[in-house]
Image: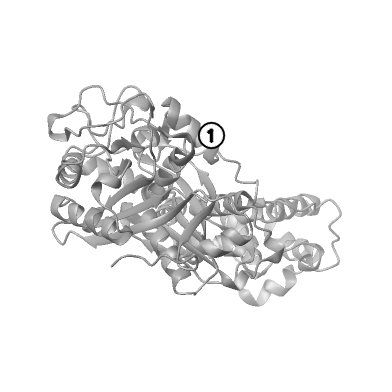
Amino acid sequence: MTKQQIRDRVLEIIAQIVPDEDLSNLRGDIPIREQVELDSMDFLDIIMELRKRYGIEVPEDDYIQLATLDGSVAYLEPRMRDL
Amino acid sequence: MMLEQHDETRIVVTGVGLAAPNGNNLAEFRQSLLVGRSGIERIDIRYMGEVLAGICHFDPLKYQKKKELRRGTRAGSIGVYCAREAMIDSKLDSACLDKSRMGVYLGITEHGTVETENEIYEIKQFDYDVKYWSHHHNPRVVANNPAGEVTLNMGITGPHYTLGGACAGGNIALIQGLQMLLLDEVDLALAGGVSESSSSFGIFAGFRSEGALASHPDPEKACRPFDRDRNGVVVAEGGCVFVLERLRDALERGANIYGEIVGYAINSDALDFIFPSAERQVECMRLSMGKAGISPEDIDIINTHGTGTIEGDPVECQAIAAVFGEYPHACINNTKSLIGHAMGAAGALELAGNLPSFRDYLVHPTINLDNLDPKCNLSNLVINEPRKIDKVDYILNNSFGMLGINSVVIAKRFAT
């Protein structure tokens, strides 16, 4: 997968978790939780979807790297590039 | 012991919100009942295939966002819809209410079954590895979930809980709401019941294993209480929430009053897990009338519990004959023939369906009664067509459940 494809997949997951929100202007460099209503339980949904859809395990210590969309793509790129 | 008769201690219904397989509000529901319109349809459910069920078709996004639906349960969604509708119907101004003095009391038969079945089904595709088990599971399955979702949606900070009373849950929650008002625990009670049971394959499978799951080539004819050819229960989802207030408060604000709850009783058979006791049903009906300070001849409409099971229906008929045999004046009907068995919502929904009788003097019929079983020979059954009567002052509502729980609620016409 390319970085853009990975970005799109992450946005798809977020869209499922916050289905009432408009994600078209989501900025990559600001924490996602400051832009949409996403609490810690919703964040765990992201982790779960990555596990279910792509078999990716994100250890708790790495959660902080997924705070922004840019950070998420950077973290996931080496793990998803061969998918 | 009789209930006292002061404006502070008289409890009235000032709002109704409901979701039924044949109506999304009281007016639609009532019209469907009067014309004999069923809400039963065929559905497909995992491991069972095609079954018959009562399914509601209200818009769950009317009062909830998509995210709330995703996080919550069907029972919660039904509860929220009914509670919001009831509040609007009551014409109470939410902004002026002290939400710490509102209580939410919802009857259920069971809760958590649907969510657990879904979760197990989900992880099955991952070879039952529990790391795929949802972190949302626990708040979905706690028994208070349906009532809790109402408080979340409406910002209510007073008490909330569900009342597990099997198929008597709805009546029991009404009684609880009334009692909490009498105890001055709250000033407003949102009381009723919800059912999401039609989403649980286990409930269907359990009834089928008992030999008590109805079948019929025509879904709308499947639920046949008191009929010679009845063959069991039709499972339904649904909900009904009443706004209960003290009469004093209702009069002060010029509320529309649907009726007054004047009598009630709850007792137990102490007999069997499933098979009911006529003796205890008799006792429950008599206790409720004693609470109301009335006699059998005062009752104008009896809404039966009647689920359509082969064993259960005759027992209730025996009990009714024992109490009302010498006073055959009361008209008798049944709501489950039209909407199926709405489980925890049944008591509340079935009472709601009859409350308009205080205004229009019509008794809605029971349908699918083509050949009355001699063992269910009740006089004055209203069959297939509604009946106009001269007097509707008291409605008696039966709901009985597994483990021998019995409940009766009596509503009285409120006249200024």
Between residue B370 and residue A71, name the one nearer to us: B370
Q: Residue B187 appears in which quarter of the rendering?
A: bottom right
Label 1 SS: helix
Residue B328 horizontal side relative to residue B71, left or right: left
Residue at 35% over, 22% down: B218
Q: Which residue is mark 1?
A: B28
| Residue found at the far bottom of this picture | A61
Evaluate whether residue A51 shows in this view. no
Type of residue at label 1?
Answer: Glu
Residue at 49% over, 57% down: B12
Evaluate whether residue A40 shows in this view. yes
Task: Look at the image and name its color scheme.
Answer: one colour
Residue at 47% over, 34% down: B360
Quadrant placement of the N terminus of chain B: bottom left
* Location of residue B127 in the rendering, given as x and y in whole percent from the top left corner: 42, 55
Q: Is residue B325 above or below residue B127?
A: above
Residue A60 horizontal side relative to residue B348, left or right: right
Q: Residue B165 appears in which quarter of the rendering?
A: bottom left
Between residue B320 and residue B55, name the one nearer to us: B320
* Location of residue A34 in the rendering, given as x and y in whole percent from the top left corner: 80, 68
| Residue found at the far front of this picture | B416
Q: Badge 1: how crowded within 10 Å, few (<14), some, or many (20+)?
A: some
Residue B202 horizontal side relative to residue B57, left or right: left
* Location of residue B90 in the rendering, given as x and y in whole percent from the top left corner: 60, 52
Q: Chain of mark 1?
A: B
* Location of residue B8 in the rendering, given as x and y in whole percent from the top left corner: 49, 68
Between residue B239 and residue B60, name the one nearer to us: B239
Q: Is residue B68 above or below residue B27?
A: below
Q: How many circles with numbers are drawn on the protein?
A: 1
